[in-house]
Image (tube, grey):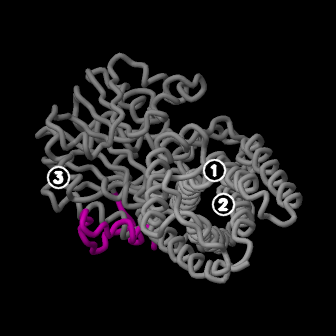
Amino acid sequence: MSDAALPARTPDARGPQPVEIALLASVFVVAACGLVYELSAAALSSYLLGDSVLQFSTIIGTYLFAMGVGSWLSRYFDRQLPAHFLRIELLVALIGGALPAILFLANAYVPGAFRLLLYGLVVVVGTLVGLEIPLVMRILKRNIVLKDLVSQVLTFDYLGALAVSVAFPLILVPQLGMIRTGLLFGVMNAAVAVWALWLFRHELRRAGAHAVACFLTLGALIGAFWGADHITTLAEDKFYQDRIVFSASSPYQRIVVTRGALGHRLFLNGNLQFAERDEYRYHEALVHPAMAAHGAPKKVAVLGGGDGMAVREILKYPSVESVTLVELDPNMTQLFTTHETLAALNGHALSSPKVKVVNTDAFQWLQQEGDTFDVIVVDFPDPTNFAIGKLYTNSFYALLDRRLSASGYAVIQTTSPLVARKSYWTVASTIESVGLKATPYHAHVPSFGEWGYIIASHRPYRQPDALPGGMRFLTPATLPLMFDFPLDMARVPTEVNRLSNQTLVTTYEQEWGKVMAH
């Protein structure tokens, strides 16, 4: 029977009936589930492909386009609308719910196909989600006048989207992880199908077959939810190679610590942050050229560096009275304070009474009125996206300038001057644009290759004559060699990185992208 053939009904003056209420509640769930799949795809693409603005924009744009295609296709569904709605719900539940798990596994086992699979799944799920609401509206049209129908459906649709947009980053991902979040909402989609099966049991042909399909779909999703840890382990063990000893998802990032023949390694969103085998090279080079040159630093700040390794090196100076560690993610500082093995790597530095941990955004922290510091160590991840890129802009360095004492030094980790030469010198130009002097240097860290740093100061930098005891890499004799740049790392003309353009993120992606492509 087509829509035109449905018997006309007069809207019930007594108000919404149970069927209408159930379908409107289903709209709320459907909208929530659809947004979760969209956010999961966008978040995973930004984790694994970098450049969060580009990934979110293209994923959301593709998803909305696919929803439009689905809405257009709904015109061709004329008969057995409840049956079509039920089938679509089961398909969305299976494909959308499994989307994060499929993408995690694809990234580990077939990374070359990841991007094609990502957008293919987004198109399929978006098209199916685009079919849902038009079908619900056509089913509800039997009993509700048009003006009430549109307002009620859109109200529940937007409420569902609002609920998930708040819960996804604050509750769902931190508590359940990306894979379980997707599967949970897949179960919810399947539950809507079961509810539709019950509501329209007298209209459905082959109701038994529909019931079996619902049962199998729910069983598969619940089973996958129960085994989500195994799925995550399967994907991450393949991706990271070494045995994973700790993993967690925070509102800000995916934290993974592995242990293998070369010791512990820390990964944030899949990017290596340190390797136990040679992290001393990185952190000695980061901290001591600035600290030792100052002479007797008393107040020190560390921006980023939630693993506490930089703080460990800073505490080797008896003159230090206080260290303020500003780290966005409290999960990082808690992990490297309380986890026995990981805290041992930083010498339990974060438990020192001299150390104060502030879990907030470093940009916002610098904007506040506060003390000035003798040394500021800036140890952020590389500018892989615009959220991190803002911490490499002239606006950020202008704020840094205000919190640096007249005789102080700030040191910034600054990617590889060999692999990302233009990116490295962009940071130098940006520091100089706010009136600070930039003193570049570099060191070889086997896990990263040739790595760069820049000291920013109000006064000219003078290399120290002595270093504290306990060094494993630096010596006063070899220190000057770090400030010498061979021809293939020599300075090149660059633009200033500003909040309004963030050229550094694009440059960085281009330079490192060439390396990854080979």
The disc label shown at residue 96, or none: 2
Question: What is the x, y in percent for residue 505?
Answer: 38, 66
Question: In the image, which is nearer the foreground, mark 2 or mark 3?
Answer: 2
Q: Amino acid at mark 1?
A: Phe
Question: What is the x, y in percent for residue 412?
Answer: 32, 49
Identify the secondary structure beneath mark 2.
Answer: helix
Question: What is the x, y in percent for residue 133?
Answer: 56, 66
Residue occupying the point 53% across, 26% down: 343
Q: Earlier in the sequence, mark 2 or mark 3?
A: 2
* Residue 240 showing in the rendered view: no
The disc label shown at residue 398, or none: 3
Q: Which residues are magenta?
A: 484-510
* Residue 179 showing in the rendered view: yes
Circle 1 Cα neighbour tier, 10 Å, few/some/many (<14 / 14–19 / ≥20): many
Q: Amino acid at mark 3?
A: Ala
Residue occupying the point 61% across, 82% down: 75
Residue occupying the point 60% across, 44% down: 177
